[in-house]
Image (cartoon, rainbow, N blue to C red):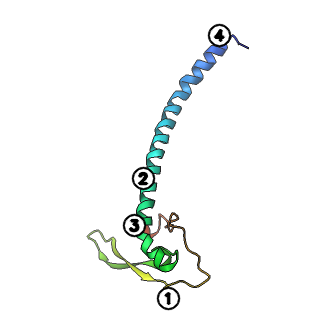
Amino acid sequence: MTKEFTAKEKGMIKNTAKTVYPMYAKLCKLEEKLKDLQIEVEAQRNTINTWEAGVMNLTGGYTSMDLCERELVQVGTDEKGKAINKANFKLRYETVIPPEDVTPTPVHAAPTIDPMSPEAANC
């Protein structure tokens, strides 16, 4: 079945194409950026997995982020009065393996940090 477009329909199709073309172009660029970011995320995950492998073998699947907590200590201020912080990592547990009520964190699920918190400034 074929359909002959009227002059109005042809104009409507062309105007729509003219309007959405920049949107499609932007969508293609965003998809390309997303593809690049996915590659970067996978590379980061592989690096983390490589570093965490020893800890996970030692502890039965727990990562260093499961076993340690990050503590910021203010060591001074800069010339503008902004705090200079140092990050210290302390073990959460005295035993090698955490208590039964703590479940291992999957390696790909990094701990979340509120971007507005003082911790985020030193990531």
Identify the image quadrant of residue 83: bottom left
The label shown at residue 95 is: 1
Name the residue rendered at 42%, 53% in the picture.
Answer: 40
Residue 94 location (% of width, % of height): 48, 89
Could you tell me the amino acid type at mark 2? Answer: Glu
Nearer to us of marks 2 and 3 is: 2
The label shown at residue 119 is: none
For marks 4 and 1 on the same chain, the one whose residue lies earlier in the sequence: 4
Above or below, comparing residue 20 to residue 43 in the picture = above
Could you tell me the amino acid type at mark 1? Answer: Thr
Name the residue rendered at 47%, 63% in the picture.
Answer: 115
The reply to whether dot 4 and dot 3 touch (C-beta < 8 Å) is no
Nearer to us of marks 4 and 2 is: 2
The residue that label 4 is drawn on is 7
State the CA–CA distance, disc 4 to disc 2.
Answer: 49 Å
Nearer to us of marks 4 and 3 is: 3
The label shown at residue 123 is: 3
Neighbour tally class for label 1: few under 14, some 14-19, many 20 plus, Cα within 10 Å = few
